[in-house]
Amino acid sequence: MAAPVGVAVVGCGFISSEYLGNLCSFADVRVLFCADIDVARAKAQADAFNVPSSGTVEEALASPEVELVVNLTIPAAHAAVTLAALEAGKHVWTEKPLAVDIASGRQLVAVAEAAGLLLGCAPDTMLGAGLQTSRRLIESGAIGKPLTALALMQASGPELWHPDPEFLYQRGAGPLFDIGPYYLSALATILGPAASVAALARRSRDTRVIATGPKAGTSFAVEAPTHVSALISYAAGGAATTVFSFESPLRRQGFLEITGTEATLAVPDPNRFDGVVRLRGVGDSDWTEVAAEGAADGRGLGVLDMARSLRHAVPHRATGELGLHVLETMEAIALSAESGSFMPVTSSFAVPEVLDAGWDPQVLTV
């Protein structure tokens, strides 16, 4: 039997605790190294999760036992860290977005393909029980032919709860690039590749104030649009209406509906792994609830899916190509908002296979 896949986590900030908690519980992977530009923070996370080594990114990439790098750095560093890991011969899973511009994203996909390395990109919520149950229902014909979608994410902004929110308002972030990947990835796996977009964007304030943590009361600059509305046309004929906003006192998060020829399906929050799926057919007086079946462990499922694909020589699901397509869709939305014109989306990807309801992250398969 083959050994578990050796993993290094690069970037030991806010989200790393969820990743590390899950990855350290999966029998098919072994977390060997925590790395960060702040080596003290890397050591603290390594100690907290019993990871044997910690240090710099360069030290992590030099480790021969590390096969797969999990890139959890801020968006502006995604491309550089991923490229360095690929050039070191490592497979890479990166947090979303794949990069902050499409040219860098294309380079990463090309380098990985040329080197015969796997490249994966968050979100892996698309592998969770909620979305996978939704996809199984759609593929069974429960809503007929999917036609349209409505996606809403509205909130006041992460500075109200995040202790270090500045990066979420920089170039390559904002609600479109930070939250958009969850919804756009879910829509892509249901409706297929996008073909064109039209959008509007707004920003109400040039500065915001951190509300919690040691930086409470500190103001910071806002670079990205904080409200984005977009229409998306899909190559297979579907259409979606989307809103991503950090400008709303009314919180509406996790709203995603798919309407088909026979029924409407309410998908659980694409930023979560669990939830209840709801169906409402033509003439129905109320929704029918369907319990979600599948994995709901949390962030790290995409890393596990990649690790199992390495050992079993099967395709993984949250691919770099899908991440690149979502990135191009977001960039096209941003350009459309600036130009006032429809913008094309030219990249494509293979729609990933649906996971079996019995797919178990905790069992040893290697």
Image (cartoon, helix red, strand yellow):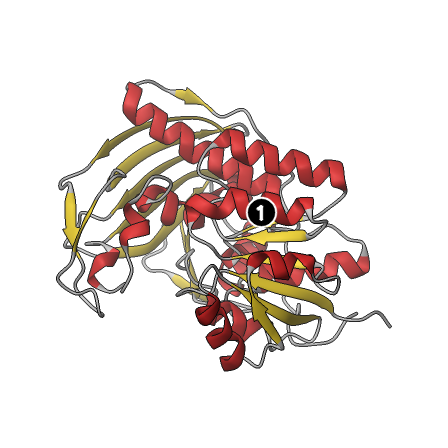
Identified at 28% across, 46% down, the residue is 169
Q: Quadrant of residue 233?
A: top left
Is 221 placed above or below 290 here? above
Label 1: how many Cα within 10 Å (few below 14, some 14–19, many 20+): many
Left or right position of 3 against 190: right
Q: Amino acid at mark 1?
A: Thr
Left or right position of 284 against 26: left
Q: Nearer the viewer, residue 110 or 25?
A: 110
Left or right position of 106 against 232: right
Residue 316 placed where, x, y %?
68, 52
Identified at 31% across, 46% down, the residue is 175
Quadrant in which the C terminus is drawn: bottom right
Q: Which residue is mark 1?
A: 82
Residue 13 placed where, x, y %?
42, 64
| Mark 1, secondary structure of its residue | helix
Is 259 placed above or below 39 here? above
Quadrant in which the N terminus is drawn: bottom right
Q: Nearer the viewer, residue 183 or 202?
A: 202
Identified at 46% across, 46% down, the residue is 77
Q: Is residue 299 visible?
A: yes
How many marks are shown on the rendered structure?
1
Q: Nearer the viewer, residue 151 or 85?
A: 85
